[in-house]
Amino acid sequence: MGDPKYPRKTWRKPKRPLNYELKMEELQTLGTFGLRTKKELWKAHTELSRVRQQARSLLALTQKVRDEKEPILLKSLSRIGLISTEATLDDVLNLKPTDLLARRLQTIVSSKLGFKTPYQARQAVIHGHIMIGERKIDIPSYTVTVEEESTIRFTPESKIPQMLEKNKSNEPKVQTSTEEGEAAAPTEAAAPTEAAKEDKPSTN
């Protein structure tokens, strides 16, 4: 059983952790989804491996047993938005770790509530500014179901919405080419012509 103080790991390291291409891919994924450490990415890989193993096990069963157990797996995955309701086991085998990371509370909050970076969304979640329905959730890795996604919102006492709105209003406006042309026109008109220079009496 092991010591209860040290629970069994829920993640596995990659077999080639020092591979350059793998390290670059991991760093890109960490930045895209705002993950704190590679451990969070490895947990997604491990969870996805478990799901794929279940799908492979179902493919090896007889058709009768498969018809009983396959809908259970597909329904649980469609509930959290990983696959559609019409998906098959082949779609489950084609899932990627990024599909699982996209269902994290941190990722959905970042795109849904207008944060500039996923790291800002992570901080808001950890500090208790996010609610799902009537519950306050402070776990960035919380897996959001399809039904819960529409109920994500800021807590009533949070001041982040006002800060985000203020930052949007303070953003500098990009001057368009038309505005640049209009602004340049008076400058050209104000410049003296060659004829005006000739007509101007000499002070010497």
Image (tube, rainbow, N blue to C red):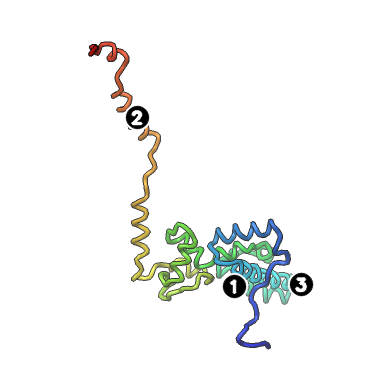
Asked if the residue at tag 1 contacts the one at tag 2, i.e. Cβ–Cβ closer than 8 Å, the answer is no
Confirm or deny contact between disc 3 and disc 1 (CB under 8 A): no
Q: For mark 2, give the secondary structure.
A: helix
* Residue at 64% over, 88% down: 3
Q: Amino acid at mark 2?
A: Ala
- Closer to the chain start, of discs 2 and 1, is 1
Mark linked to residue 60: 3
Residue at numbered disc 1: 76
Instruction: Residue at 68% x, 88% y: name it.
Output: 1
* Quadrant, the C terminus: top left
Residue 196 position in % (x across, y down) = 27, 14
- Say which residue appears at 70% left-offset and 67% top-offset: 14
Q: Earlier in the sequence, mark 3 or mark 1?
A: 3
Q: Amino acid at mark 1?
A: Ser
Q: x, y (%) of residue 108?
A: 49, 63
Q: Mark 2 highlights which residue?
A: 184
Q: Is the C-beta separation of discs 3 and 2 under 8 Å?
A: no
Could you give the CA–CA distance between mark 3 and mark 1, rounded to whole angstroms? Answer: 20 Å
Label 1: few (<14), some (14–19) or many (≥20) C-alpha neighbours in 10 Å: few
Q: Earlier in the sequence, mark 3 or mark 2?
A: 3
Which numbered tag is attached to residue 111?
Answer: none
Query: Which percent across, then down, holds residue 116?
Result: 45, 57
28 or 54: nearer the viewer: 28
- For residue 20, side relative to residue 149 (left or right): right
Q: Amino acid at mark 3?
A: Ala
* Label 3 crowd bin: few (<14), some (14–19), many (20+), radius 10 Å: few
Q: Residue 141: x, y in percent?
A: 53, 70
SS for dot 1:
helix
Examine the rendered structure and indicate whether residue 146 appears above or below residue 20. Answer: below
- Distance from the alpha carbon under mark 2 to that under mark 1: 62 Å
Task: Name the mark nearer the viewer: 2 or 1.
Answer: 2
Q: Residue furthest front?
A: 204
